[in-house]
């Protein structure tokens, strides 16, 4: 693609909003962000609506499905690309397809598919998030109990190889596990491969969670959910997450999974930049579907919830643009900070902030054009423009 200019809108760099600036793109990357009067002459120029904001594209690290597609049902390259394509309409330009607890052979298919999708230019796929199978049978949520297990030596070897392969390709393996179900040596070996380890679906004690954080666990998957509640003499993983300045916390801000008051307290407790947004999206997102199937069971879409027939939450009915809106409306977070929680902070967690999460020279041209209500007019993925 030839060098060209985006201009006319306000520009959010990931740190601040600029007025009267233009963004110069070339070969899928950002070349410059300059005052409009200093933009190069003679280049093709796209005039954007004046009432819009050009921002870093959203990065979603927990996406089970969208557009009628569930990654567990179809652990293929085409499925990963279809999910990414659907979520682009809501501003997500990079994501980790998420594969929840399942049979080993299907997990291998999902890992291979996500890796091959990552290797396709402009896919928006950053690797894979394995949510299980090394989780607590006491806190399975909607995960299939018969597939929950503890890892063996072969599991560790294959996961280390996967973490290294994805890191070499510029992607990441994110793995959610229960710290009480694995040894510290497992955590140390796997984190050393470039994989990012999160605690989730866990019944771990406060003490065990602290040990796991010291051994390589970096954060928490949907903090509060699928974890024991805080008790007077048993603070558990939730308080460990609150206390650790280094630990990252992914949260689902849909007004359903966690009470907003709990999330507001989390934001007060954590250092700025350590809480980020995820959707935990499922197949109905981006569609009008009212049901889908998970592990052979019907999941119902009701009043903003996705639930089994007995009322267990089964992922979330939300996209990232809605999560940003809710973060402002329900949590009182400034708009710019909510945008960072959906872009810059996930990029930092993965160690990809030099390429993603901001608008600066050298970064990939992964952008979202937003109205004031966070509706999405257009996206760019590696410079490829798509209007919605």
Image (spheres, helix red, strand yellow):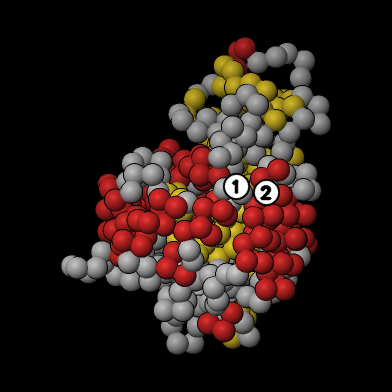
Q: Is residue 215 above or below residue 74?
A: above
Looking at the image, residue 155 sits to the left or right of residue 228; the answer is right
**Mark 1: secondary structure:** loop
Q: Which of 276 and 129 is in front in this view?
A: 129
Which is nearer the N-term, disc 2 or disc 1? Answer: 2
Q: Position of residue 143 (x, y in %)?
A: 53, 77
Considering every residue shown, the one lying at the far right of the view is 1
Q: Position of residue 172 (x, y in %)?
A: 62, 49
Quadrant housing the N terminus:
top right
Residue that label 2 marks:
164
The reply to whether residue 134 is in sight is: yes
Total marks shown come to 2
Could you give the CA–CA distance between mark 2 and mark 1, rounded to whole angstroms? 6 Å
Where is residue 215? Give x, y as percent.
44, 52
162 or 230, nearer to the observer:
162
Q: Nearer the viewer, residue 18 or 265?
A: 265
Residue that badge 1 annotates = 194
Q: Do the residues labelled 2 and 1 touch (CB within 8 Å)?
A: yes
């Amino acid at each position: 693609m030839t060098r060209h200019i985006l201009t006319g809108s306000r520009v959010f760099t990931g740190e601040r909003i600029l007025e009267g600036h233009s963004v110069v793109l070339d070969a899928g990357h950002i070349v410059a962000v300059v005052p409009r009067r200093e933009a190069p002459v003679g280049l093709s120029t796209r005039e954007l609506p004046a009432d819009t904001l050009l921002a870093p594209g959203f990065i979603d690290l927990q996406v089970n499905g969208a557009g009628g597609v569930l990654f567990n049902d179809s652990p293929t390259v085409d499925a990963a690309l279809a999910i990414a394509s659907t979520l682009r309409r809501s501003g997500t330009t990079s994501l980790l397809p998420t594969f929840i607890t399942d049979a080993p052979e299907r997990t291998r298919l999902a890992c291979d598919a996500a890796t091959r999708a990552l290797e396709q230019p402009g896919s928006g796929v950053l690797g894979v998030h394995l949510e299980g199978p090394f989780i607590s049978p006491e806190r399975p949520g909607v995960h299939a109990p018969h597939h929950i297990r503890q890892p063996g030596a072969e599991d560790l070897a294959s996961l280390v190889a996967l973490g290294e392969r994805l890191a070499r390709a510029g992607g990441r393996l994110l793995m959610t596990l229960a710290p009480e179900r694995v040894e510290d040596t497992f955590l140390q070996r796997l984190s050393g491969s470039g994989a990012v380890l999160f605690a989730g679906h866990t019944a771990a004690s406060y003490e065990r969670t602290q040990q796991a954080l010291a051994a390589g666990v970096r954060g928490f998957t949907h903090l509060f959910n699928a974890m024991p509640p805080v008790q007077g003499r048993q603070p558990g993983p939730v308080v460990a997450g609150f206390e650790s300045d280094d630990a990252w916390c992914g949260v689902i801000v849909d007004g359903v999974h966690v009470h907003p008051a709990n999330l507001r307290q989390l934001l007060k407790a954590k250092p700025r930049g350590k809480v980020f947004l995820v959707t935990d999206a499922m197949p109905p997102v981006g569609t009008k579907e009212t049901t889908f199937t998970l592990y052979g069971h019907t999941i119902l879409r009701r009043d903003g919830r996705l639930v089994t027939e007995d009322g267990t939450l089964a992922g979330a009915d939300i996209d990232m643009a809605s999560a940003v809106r809710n973060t402002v409306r329900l949590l009182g977070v400034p708009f710019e900070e909510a945008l960072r929680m959906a872009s810059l902070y996930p990029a930092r967690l993965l160690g990809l902030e030099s390429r993603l999460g901001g608008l600066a020279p050298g970064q990939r041209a992964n952008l979202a054009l937003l109205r004031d209500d966070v509706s999405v007019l257009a996206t760019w993925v590696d410079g490829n423009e798509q209007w919605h």
